[in-house]
Amino acid sequence: MNRFEVIIVGGGLAGLTSAIHLALKGRSVCLFEKEAYPHHKVCGEYISNEIVPYLQHLGIFLEANGAKTINILELSTVKGESLRLELPLGGKGISRYAFDHLLFERAKALGVAFVFQTVRFINYQENTFQVGTNKSVYSAQAVIGSYGKRDLLDKRLKRSFMQKKSTWLGVKCHYVYDDFPEDEVALHNFVGGYGGLSKTETNAVNFCYLASYETFKRYKNIHQFNKEVVSRNPFLGSFLEKAIPIFDEPMTIAQISFDRKEVVENHILMCGDAAGLIHPLCGNGMAMAIHSAKIATELLIRYFQEEGFDRILLEKEYRKQWNSAFANRLRTGKYLQSLLLSESFSRVAMTTAARSSWLLRKLVTQTHGKPIVC
């Protein structure tokens, strides 16, 4: 009764799209998620158009569900030097609350089984996985790990990045702010971090930022940090002064790690943030999560259907394709973050980019992929 071909641990974008794709191919799938849908997550809520053809292939149509069409990028330094750029590919603005729920409903309609419990262990022995919660144990031939940036499972799997303490904090809140253009995504720097603004399907503006813990810990709480640090950027100061928060309190996530992660751990295929996290300033973490799910899913379908394509080849090919798709983008994102977090360098970079729109468009292209062909 608890046996499946594939178990997916984590019901975010990567997990849900994997489940939909596998179900469309007739595979039996069980997905574990801690919280019932819908729910909010700390996320930039801007998704690159590179992923839209694949989503449509899965029967997911973002614009039909209210997603905003975004084609302008605005950037600013700590002191407010700014520039605007037409995005080479563009994207969509949609909340994780709506997006995840849309994917959940599609997966459920296709017969994916859902278990809303916390996974306590994943064991592999004799070509079979055992996945356990506090209530029961499930088995599968393959497991996809798509449980996000950091989890107790990472500790149990003895993943190397868990040995280091991360110094980044993520903060998110939705606001009423009618003056923000719905076709724009903005990225504004402040001392020790940067934040993104974009409209969602409800017309709320999502403000999500990343801050270094070293900068944040000097202040009593998020409200004081926003007032004393974030608001020093003129754009963010004006926004926070006029915008009306919708959430009772901002959402937070601590110990965000950008360290290298293995994409296969104990024979588990890691997807999304569990495999590798691109710096939020690049604006396409959501698309990368979905793309990684597509790669893993298509290889699993080969594993089930193609004689001779065994687990060793499956894992080898997944590592190869994942690195081909994302390794350069992650490196570029890391470089850009170090550049923009340096006030002197960011001002020089902004001045240079303002004189050469071609250069800035090139940098944006380097951190994004091409539209995925299905």
Image (cartoon, helix red, strand yellow):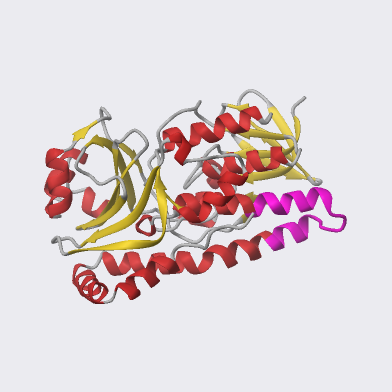
Write down the quadrant of residue 188 in the picture.
Answer: bottom left
Between 272 and 56, the residue placed more toward the observer is 56
Residue at 19% from the left image edge and 42% from the top image edge: 179
Q: With 200 as the anchor, is 37 left or right in this view?
A: right
Between 161 and 76, the residue placed more toward the observer is 76
Residue farthest along the right direction in this orientation: 307
Q: Let me know if residue 96 is in the magenta part.
A: no
Tally of marks: 0
Q: With 20 as the anchor, is 196 left or right in this view?
A: left
Could you say where residue 30 lies in the image, as x and y percent from the top left?
67, 33
Q: Let me know if residue 305 is in the magenta part.
A: yes
Query: Is residue 1 at least partly visible in the picture?
Result: yes
The relative height of residue 131 versus residue 49 in the rendered view (above or below) is above
Q: With 18 as the anchor, is 79 left or right in this view?
A: left
Q: Main secondary structure of the magenta part?
A: helix
Residue at 33% from the left image edge and 39% from the top image edge: 252
Could you say where residue 356 lies in the image, as x and y percent from the top left?
28, 76
Q: Which residues are magenta?
A: 295-317
Residue at 50% from the left image edge and 42% from the top image edge: 151
Write down the quadrant of residue 319 in the picture.
Answer: bottom right
Query: Is residue 265 at least partly visible in the picture?
Result: no
Could you say where residue 107 lies in the image, as x and y percent from the top left?
62, 33
Could you say where residue 340 lies in the image, as x and y percent from the top left?
27, 66
The relative height of residue 167 versus residue 83 in the rendered view (above or below) is above
Considering the image in quadrants, where does the N terminus appear? Answer: top right
Considering the image in quadrants, where does the C terminus appear? Answer: bottom right
Residue farthest along the front direction in this orientation: 64
